[in-house]
Image (spheres, rainbow, N blue to C red):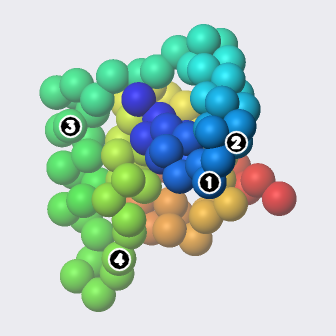
Amino acid sequence: MPTALLVGVQRAQTDAQRIRRTAFVESILASIPALPFDQKVARIHAQLLAAIPRNETVGAHDIQIAATAVCHDFPVLTQNGKDFRKLAGVTVLDFA
């Protein structure tokens, strides 16, 4: 489930904003299938996490996204290419 989108709905300041955000997020969820975080992805996640040098940091969610992308042979489209490039085997597409 795309947590960041759902958090945006929960952080709405007004009921009207929450309704608009909910409709937007639900339209996205209906058109783009969610990929599972299963054992295969979890194993890739562990490999990516273990390979990060101790002096580097990468967000926990970024590693989950990267592991899912690697497992399904997808690139990661992001504005945060710097962190994703720290993860071996991840193809990064920069979103300008």
Question: Which residue has dot 3 on it?
Answer: 42
In this rendering, the label closer to the viewer, 1 or 3:
1
Q: Is residue 94 above or below residue 23?
A: below
Q: Is residue 21 above or below residue 33?
A: below
Question: Which residue has dot 2 on it?
Answer: 17
Q: Are marks 1 and 3 in contact (CB under 8 Å)?
A: no
Position of 77 compared to 51: left or right?
Answer: right
Q: Secondary structure at mark 4?
A: loop
Q: Nearer the viewer, residue 18 or 78?
A: 18
Graded by Cα atoms within 10 Å as few (under 14), some (14 to 19) or many (20 or more), the crowding at tag 3 reads some
Separation of residues labelled 4 and 2 (CA atoms): 34 Å
Q: Position of residue 31 (x, y in %)?
A: 65, 13
Q: Is residue 27 above or below residue 3?
A: above
Separation of residues labelled 3 and 4 (CA atoms): 19 Å
Question: Which residue has dot 4 on it?
Answer: 57
Amino acid type, label 3: Ala
Q: Are marks 3 and 2 in contact (CB under 8 Å)?
A: no
Res 4 visible: no
Query: At 46% from the left edge and 21% from the top edge, which residue is drawn?
Result: 34
Q: Secondary structure at mark 3?
A: helix
Q: Are marks 1 and 2 in contact (CB under 8 Å)?
A: yes
Question: Which residue has dot 1 on it?
Answer: 13
Q: Position of residue 41 (x, y in %)?
A: 27, 32
Query: At 43% from the left edge and 55% from the top edge, which residue is drawn?
Result: 62
Graded by Cα atoms within 10 Å as few (under 14), some (14 to 19) or many (20 or more), the crowding at tag 2 reads some
Amino acid type, label 4: Thr
Amino acid type, label 2: Gln
Q: Quadrant of the C terminus?
A: bottom right
Separation of residues labelled 1 and 2 (CA atoms): 7 Å
